Image: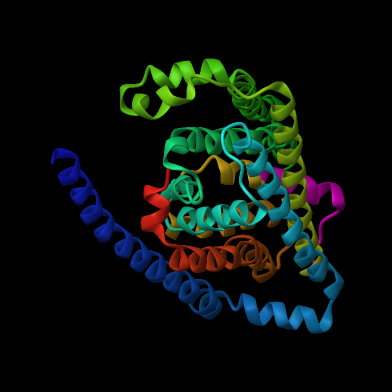
Amino acid sequence: MATSLKHAVYQLKSGMWIPALKVFVVLGLAWFVYDKLWFQQESTGYLSHLVQVWNNGKPVFLISCLLLAPLNWFVEISKWKKLTRPFHTLSWKQASESILAGITLGLLTPSRLGEYGGRLLHVDAQFRAQTLFAHFMGSLAQNIPVFIFGGLCSLFFFSNHYFSNTTMSLGLSGIAWFFAGMLVILFSQNKVLLHWLGGIKLIRRFTHKTTQWRYVKETLHEVAMLSVLRYLIFAGQYILLLYFFDIDVSLAEAITGVGVIFMFQSGLPLPPALSVFARTQLALIVWSVYDKDQISMLAVPLVLWLLNLLLPALAGGWVILSSNLNKESSHG
């Protein structure tokens, strides 16, 4: 009797939150489409500028950037399959849908926290704790190259353009490298990380199921290499857009500036409404030391955001809307 009552309450709750989630996704994506394709165009004219540059410039750079987008997500899907392989086997289709759903929910939540929920798609209920930990490990791995390269790029950028005292640039780079070192330790010593997380009362019930296993070195090395590759693809896309919009920077300056921007983007836990604003302002701060074309500086992060986040998020919205989440949430 008690079990039946508990199941009935669970079904009632599921019947309430799942439609609410789908409405949230539709409204959230509709707002982003309006904001980025209409409001931002009205305020900055970046899409009109893109068309003008396409007609007068070098479309090969934009085409190359577009071609890198599928490779970017192929790498992320491969990484996700490797992270979940120790406890659950996902097909390429399932892994792709999990990634897309995660992008959608991450886009609509502060600090991309909703991405954790999206990654639970197609995973049995008994493996939810392991899945959340797998995504956490993937995030650690992705941030390691961001802060290693970001620290090096910051040293050259700020010492040449903002800080007359090299010591201040070294201090900023040292902070980035210290943070990267901490991430490397947490990533490589995942058994210790699990034990430490288990000591936090708030999340203890999510971690006790994961203490029976750990990632082997081979898996960690593969995930780390894929994370570096994905970072390089992101950086390559940004640099290609810089040259498409004809921003006056050398290759070395472009690499340095992109490294700085990526580092500060990763270190700013902002709500969705401010994340794109922060990207554009960082772009203005960095590229204004080389060029005066502010429309192009604004267009680069906006186009990259549309390509790498909004378009996959729209696909992820379709995945969420078309999925039987009642079945997924109770599976296993």
Residue 157 shows in this picture? no
Q: Nearer the viewer, residue 108 or 286?
A: 108
The residue drawn where x is 34% and y is 27% is: 205
Q: Nearer the viewer, residue 48 or 311?
A: 311
242 to the left or right of 97: right
Residue 320: say if magenta. no
The residue drawn where x is 73% and y is 46% is: 230
184 to the left or right of 128: right
Question: x and y percent of residue 68 in the render?
Answer: 78, 60
Residue 295 shows in this picture? yes
Question: x and y percent of residue 142 in the render?
Answer: 64, 38
The colour mode here is: rainbow
Specify the principal SS of the magenta part: helix
154 to the left or right of 3: right
Question: x and y percent of residue 67 in the render?
Answer: 79, 65
Q: Nearer the viewer, residue 29 or 323?
A: 323
Question: x and y percent of residue 301 in the render?
Answer: 64, 61
162 to the left or right of 206: right
Q: Nearer the viewer, residue 152 or 78?
A: 78
Quarter that holds the N terminus:
top left
Decide: is 105 above or below 265: below
Decide: is 142 above or below 109: above
Residue 254: say if magenta. yes
Q: Residue furthest front?
A: 1
Quarter that holds the C terminus:
top left
- Residue range (magenta): 246-260
Count of numbered tags: 0
